[in-house]
């Protein structure tokens, strides 16, 4: 069991900056996120799109912001638990026992929910028999592309992820790209590249087709796809990849006894604590009068929540406010040598 001061749920910008603030005041933390990388909405929804309202940063992309925040928390050696979702929590005396979907357990003094608008989960195939192949030969994200080398891959979707992976994997695999419409929602340059590869015989493109059924025992052997006009094709496939976008859900948070209002968690504005002592909520997932869903607001909330955690992590100590420009303790924690 991991015994730490604070567990942060959510590795978006708000959660990352909260980790920084916890480190500044000498508290340890770890971060759980159900995505496969840090950055939250910034990375999943707009990694390349410009953001114009970060103080003192006239313009940056979601990816640049995430990378800078990760660089900022490096001195604190924050451990990440990605592809994990917090499923259970239990109060034990003055601390919390927390368990993730992957079986990781924590013993923590406080919890900070920085889950954006909830946990991101992939939209899945509606064909029921697909479920038994999930995580095996049917995937909704790619962690290791080398497993597809010299295999036959059937990719479903018409957005950037489907197009980009079809292009990438066509270099080492036999790729079938299947989309339910004629038109694509991804970048036009990617659409043209896919069509070019199709014309060159380097990938197969099927439009106006959807998944009809999956055949196989332990792994997928072949799939059947159905055209809008009723025609059915059988395609041998080693792997099936589905890229239909993400849906956002509050998930198990709904069962924790928190005050929920319109899919957000109500907090006070003194330290962004919820109605349950020791559990805080920051970023887009929290609500209070005058709330602005801006990243800069989340930074403010994270700074105050971190200080709110202190009394639970170190109940016998008094937190003294100090500036990083003059605090020797803070500078030592940041690894600054003078």
Image: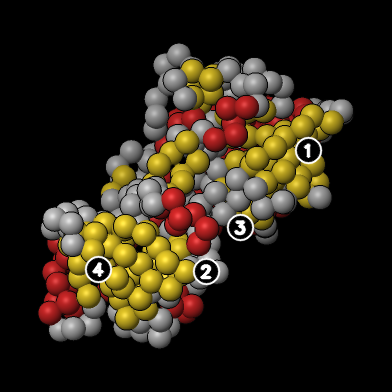
Q: Upstream in the sequence, badge 2 or badge 4?
A: 2
Camera-near label (4 vs 3) is: 4
Label 2: which residue? 217
Between label 2 and label 3, give the one nearer the viewer. Answer: 2
Name the residue tied to disc 1. Answer: 97
Mark 4 and mark 3: Cα distance apart in space: 51 Å
> Which circle's residue, 1 or 2, is located before the other in the chain?
1
Nearest the camera: 109 or 320? Answer: 109
Q: Is residue 336 visible?
A: no
Residue at point 42%, 16% (across, down): 290
Q: Earlier in the sequence, mark 4 or mark 3?
A: 3
Q: In the image, residue 57 lies at what x, y percent?
A: 36, 46
- Disc 4 element: strand
Q: CA distance from mark 2 to mark 3?
A: 45 Å
Q: Which of pointers 3 and 1 indicates the residue nearer the eye?
A: 1
Q: Is residue 294 above or below residue 32?
A: above
Residue linked to disc 3? 74
Please tell me which residue lies in front, 115 or 253: 253
Residue indicated by mark 4: 233
Q: Split into 4 quadrants, where in the image is the C terminus?
A: bottom right
Instruction: Please report the residue visible at 60 percent of the width from the left and 50 percent of the height from the top.
Output: 84
């Amino acid at each position: 069991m991991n015994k730490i001061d604070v567990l942060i749920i959510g590795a978006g910008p708000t959660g990352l900056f909260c980790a920084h603030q916890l480190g500044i005041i000498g508290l340890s933390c770890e971060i759980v996120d159900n995505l496969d990388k840090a950055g939250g909405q910034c990375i999943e929804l707009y990694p390349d799109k410009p953001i114009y309202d970060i103080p003192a940063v006239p313009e940056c992309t979601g990816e640049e912001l995430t990378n800078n925040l990760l660089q900022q928390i490096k001195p604190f050696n924050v451990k990440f638990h990605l592809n994990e979702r917090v499923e259970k929590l239990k109060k034990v005396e003055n601390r919390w026992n927390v368990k993730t979907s992957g079986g990781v357990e924590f013993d923590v003094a406080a919890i900070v929910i920085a889950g954006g608008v909830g946990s991101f989960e992939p939209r899945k195939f509606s064909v029921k028999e697909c479920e038994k192949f999930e995580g095996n030969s049917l995937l909704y994200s790619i962690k290791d592309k080398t497993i597809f080398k010299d295999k036959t891959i059937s990719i479903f979707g018409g957005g950037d992820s489907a197009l980009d992976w079809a292009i990438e994997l066509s270099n080492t695999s036999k790729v079938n790209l299947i989309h339910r419409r004629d038109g694509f929602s991804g970048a036009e340059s990617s659409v043209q590249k896919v069509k070019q590869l199709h014309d060159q015989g380097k990938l197969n493109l099927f439009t106006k087709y959807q998944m009809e059924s999956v055949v196989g025992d332990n792994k997928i052997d072949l799939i059947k796809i159905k055209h809008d006009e009723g025609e059915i094709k059988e395609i041998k496939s080693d792997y099936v990849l589905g890229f239909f976008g993400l849906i956002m859900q509050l998930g198990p948070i709904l069962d924790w006894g928190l005050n929920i209002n319109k899919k957000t968690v109500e907090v006070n504005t003194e330290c962004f604590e919820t109605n349950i002592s020791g559990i805080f909520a920051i970023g887009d997932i929290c609500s209070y009068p005058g709330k602005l869903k801006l990243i800069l607001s989340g930074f403010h909330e994270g700074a105050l929540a971190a200080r709110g955690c202190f009394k639970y992590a170190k109940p016998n100590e008094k937190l003294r406010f100090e500036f990083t420009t003059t605090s020797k303790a803070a500078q030592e924690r940041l690894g600054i040598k003078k």
